[in-house]
Amino acid sequence: MLGPVILAASHSDRMRRLISAAPVTRQVVDRFIPGETVDDVVPIVEDLTGRGLELTMDVVGEDITTPAQATAARDAYLRLVERLGPLELGTRAEMSVKLSMFGQALEGGHELALANVRPVVEAAAAIGTTVTLDAEDHTTLDSMFAIHEELRRDFPQTGCVIQAYLFRTEADARRLAAAGSRVRLVKGAYKEPAEVAHQQKHEIDKAYVRVLRTLMEGEGYPMVGSHDPRLISIAQELARQAGRKPDEYEFQMLYGIRSDEHLRLAAEGHRMRVYTAYGTDWYGYFMRRLAEKPANLLFFARSVITR
Ligand code: FAD
């Protein structure tokens, strides 16, 4: 029950101000967002890749209100690419972007987001890596898939995300499970109405398995984005049934969540990519992590009270 309340609060400016100003917030935030600048995260990239993990890097930020902020987002990613280049990690360190941060919700947003994201995708390709377009709320997805298709004309390795909770996703998965595609499947992190999305956990989990089967049996490259132990075992079984070798799909988890499992799967020979977010505008990302596991909220509240 708490999850939807927290997700609603993730759009409240008043809550944003309150939570951002709480003295202990930074400590709790650090668990999920381990830095504010690219200098903070480069050592983390080196540490995780040194331990056999791969990364997808996210500069946090969304709900922007001006084109100048969208340009600033583009520039933040370009600075990241500049720092990743000399590390020569190739696709071991790729990037995830939210098109809202590139201006998608502003006037003329579709074109603006495409114009801002394209240089990031080009710069990523120039250092031998790639970009995945995150999935945001359902109203943004037609635009996201159109931008994905457009970018793939020149950069076929550009990935995208689909969300198991949406009714539309089974059809999206069938369309996307073609040769050369890179598709991350997640359960979905936004508050969506019953007209467009499953609301019950068991229905979302069943949909996840159906969609994952489509991706595994298809010709693309499935990226299994989940911390759910049951779904991870099922993914291994579906990969086996589809005759996929360990380098023909990968697991992805978020930084700070089930970190032992990241290392365990990597040690077993799986490709494991850690979604690592950094930046100053962490509020929306942080609130979604609280909503996914209300126990996180209790931990956060206890830190504030006992301080
Ligand atoms: P759950 O059933 O929620 O969790 C399974 C177990 O994992 C829990 O029991 C708990 O032990 C642990 N766990 C999960 N979440 C947390 C948490 N926040 N804190 C502590 N423990 C936790 N969603 C989108 O809508 N769009 C995206 O583009 C997107 N990209 C993602 C990228 C990656 C790599 C991952 C892993 C997730 C992404 N998500 C995205 C979030 C996703 O939709 C889910 O909200 C999130 O992954 C939780 O679902 P789960 O599959 O881990 O299963």
Image: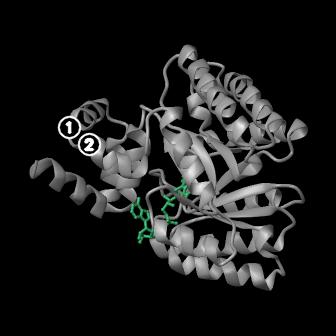
CA gap between label 2 and label 1 equals 5 Å
Q: Quadrant of residue 218?
A: bottom right
Q: Quadrant of residue 104?
A: top right
Please give the count of numbered marks on the rendered protein. 2
Q: Are marks 2 and 1 in contact (CB under 8 Å)?
A: yes
Point 17% across, 52% down: residue: 303
Can residue 204 be seen in the rendering of this structure? no
Q: Which residue is mark 2?
A: 25
Q: Amino acid at mark 2?
A: Thr
Q: Quadrant of residue 67?
A: top right
Q: Which residue is mark 1?
A: 22
Is 170 above or below relative to 148?
Answer: below
Question: Camera-side residue: 213 or 92?
Answer: 92
Is 103 above or below relative to 217?
Answer: above
Question: Camera-side residue: 116 or 79?
Answer: 79
Whole-percent x, y for residue 135 in the image: 61, 47
The quadrant of the rendering that contains the N terminus is bottom left
How many other residues sit within 10 Å of disc 1, few (<14), some (14-19) or many (≥20)?
A: few
